[in-house]
Amino acid sequence: MPRARIRIGTSGWAYKHWRRVFYPRGLRQRDELAYIAQHFNSVELNGSFYSLQRPDSYRAWYAQTPADFVFALKGSRFISHNKKLRDAETPLANFFASGVLLLKEKLGPIVWQLPERTRFDADRLDRFFSLLPRDTKAAAALASQHDARVPEDESWTETDATRPLRYALEPRSRDFVTRECIDLLRRHDIALVAADSGRWPLFEEVTASFVYLRLHGSPQTYASQYTDSALDRWAAAIAAWRSGREPSDAARVTELPLPSRRARDVYVYFDNDGFAHAPQDALRLAERLARPA
């Protein structure tokens, strides 16, 4: 079994206010991804949430990052917010046809962020999860069914190899604090995002073969810098999840036994981008996890 990995990065990288704070003076904007990839082994690509990207963009992002780099991808808000996960087959085809598969072996988990007002609907989630392709070959087949929103000359419907795909769900309502939700996510091997913020419920329930964290900043969402003690706690929790355990103070939804697994990959993305805290906090966390136990 391959060794479990911890991936640490930021949610996005193209922020003007990071310049001269995290990015050095004189660094060209087009070189910012390559620069951040020198410091972290992953990044969460959030442009895919706002609009369909193009194959040339994915091709460029792949080329600008080292071999061991991984992109987590935010799923389209057209699917999660506009369609509310209903009638999602064609929008999913468009999403994958936009060039996602050009990330090749660097394609990490795809995270679906739900609006705060979205209520838990087991049937709707079950139908949506059943549509998600579970490997890149299935994703390429789905992508070939795209419609005119992705023109033929701006689409990519091939994969260079068959690789498994991972998915995570970030609900922002306490309506998801149910045993039924946890059972559903476990059945589909969908990670329930541990989203730390000053606004939304924190779930620290293991529901998949990997763990996904989004650290938005607390107590002030998107703005607060993490304290040393908070980062110490996150480092300890991440180390536990990686080793197949869980932190003793985990914010559990249920009392179900932890799914048996010797190790889990853990993906961690800082989204407290205000005042350039995100990259600084990511560096501080990575330093803690690099120390001997």
Image (tube, rainbow, N blue to C red):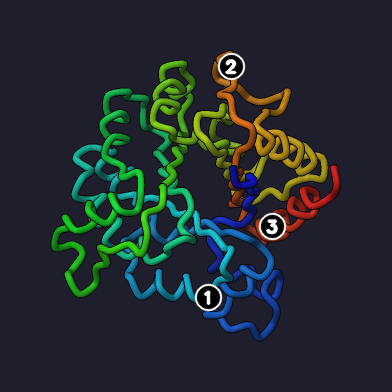
Identified at 53% across, 68% down, the residue is 14
SS of the residue under disc 2:
loop
Q: Position of residue 5 (x, y in %)?
A: 64, 48
Q: Position of residue 151 (x, y in %)?
A: 18, 69
Q: Position of residue 67 (x, y in %)?
A: 56, 68
Q: Position of residue 222 (x, y in %)?
A: 60, 50
Give 97 or 159, whichever is nearer the viewer: 159
- Spatial distance from mark 2 to mark 3, Cα to Cα? 36 Å
Q: Which quadrant is home to the C terminus?
A: top right
Q: Which residue position is annotated with label 3? A: 277
Specify the amino acid type for callout 1: Gln
Q: Which residue position is annotated with label 2? A: 257
Identified at 38% across, 32% down, the residue is 117
Identified at 47% across, 71% down, the residue is 61
Specify the amino acid type for callout 3: His
177 relative to 223, above or below: above
Going from N to C along the chain, the mark reached first, 1 or 3, is 1
Going from N to C along the chain, the mark reached first, 2 or 3, is 2
SS of the residue under disc 3:
helix
- Which numbered circle lies on residue 4? none
Of tags 1 and 3, which is closer to the observer?
1
The answer to whether residue 22 shows anywhere in this view is yes
Q: Which quadrant is home to the N terminus?
A: top right
- Spatial distance from mark 2 to mark 1, Cα to Cα? 42 Å
Of tags 2 and 3, which is closer to the observer?
2
- Spatial distance from mark 1 to mark 3, Cα to Cα? 24 Å
